[in-house]
Image (spheres, helix red, strand yellow):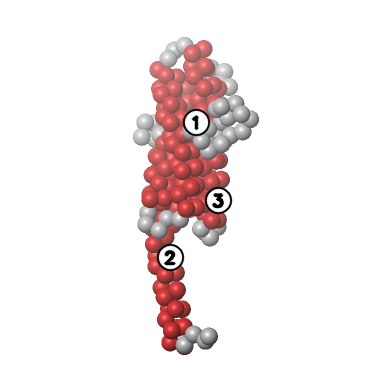
Amino acid sequence: MTIPKIRFAVLIATACLFAISGDIAAQASHAHMGHVADSWGDAPDEAGLLPTASAEAEIAALHAGLAARASGLGSMKAHIGHVLNAIDPSVEPSGPGKGYGVVKAATGAATHIRLAANADGASDNVKLHANHVGTSADNVVQWAKRIVELCAEVKATDDAAAAAEAAQEIEKLTQAILNGRDADGDGRTSWGEDEGGLEQAAFHMNLMKRGEGMD
């Protein structure tokens, strides 16, 4: 049976309307995804929040390694100040970081990825991977805040041995921020609590974007 031309046109128009409505509904979710992955207005060079966190974390990890291998307490403290600047410039405003900090960038990433998941029209794909990205970003924030505490200890002490021990822990934490860590000893690093870092967050962010046709 042939569908009358008018009825067929109505069916096509209705289908198009639903498709357009779906696209509009997903726009808010995709906008927040873009803030995390691609561009955020107050970040350095308007980069995404995750890339900004990674750039700051690379600087922090470099100087954490230099601090852990420093031959004197003065040099150690200088590099620890540089770590702190990249982690949280509101605590240490002077240094080689980009002026945004891991804490702020990762906190922003966690916030916006959850806004993406909770937005009207968010797909199951977004909701699934937002949990993965958000959990890893939360881990980064917690590790970064612990680094701030340890940096304060190094800066306050005159005990070179105690400072060196703290610097080694700071170095481990910066590596966890960048690459995650195998907290449960099962031989792999997941996105889960106390495991996922920026590498895992970026991996699941890319999966999310691919699922939304945004790669």
Q: Is residue 94 above or below residue 31?
A: above
Where's the C terminus, which quadrant? bottom right
Disc 2 to disc 1: CB gap under 8 Å? no
Measured from the top left, where is residue 213 in percent x and y?
53, 60
Residue underneath mark 2: 23
Q: Decide which of tag 3 and tag 2 comes sooner along the chain.
A: 2
Q: Is residue 106 above or below residue 182?
A: below
Residue 97 in view of the camera: no
Measured from the top left, where is residue 132 in percent x and y?
49, 42
Q: Nearer the viewer, residue 36 or 167?
A: 36
* Dot 1 crowding, Cα within 10 Å, few <14, some 14–19, many 20+: many
Q: Amino acid at mark 3?
A: Leu
| Distance CA(mark 3)–CA(mark 1) | 21 Å
* Dot 3 crowding, Cα within 10 Å, few <14, some 14–19, many 20+: some
Q: Is residue 87 above or below residue 109?
A: above
Residue underneath mark 3: 207
Q: Nearer the viewer, residue 193 or 45?
A: 193
Q: Residue at x 43, y 87 (%)?
A: 6
| Distance CA(mark 2)–CA(mark 1) | 36 Å
Residue underneath mark 1: 194
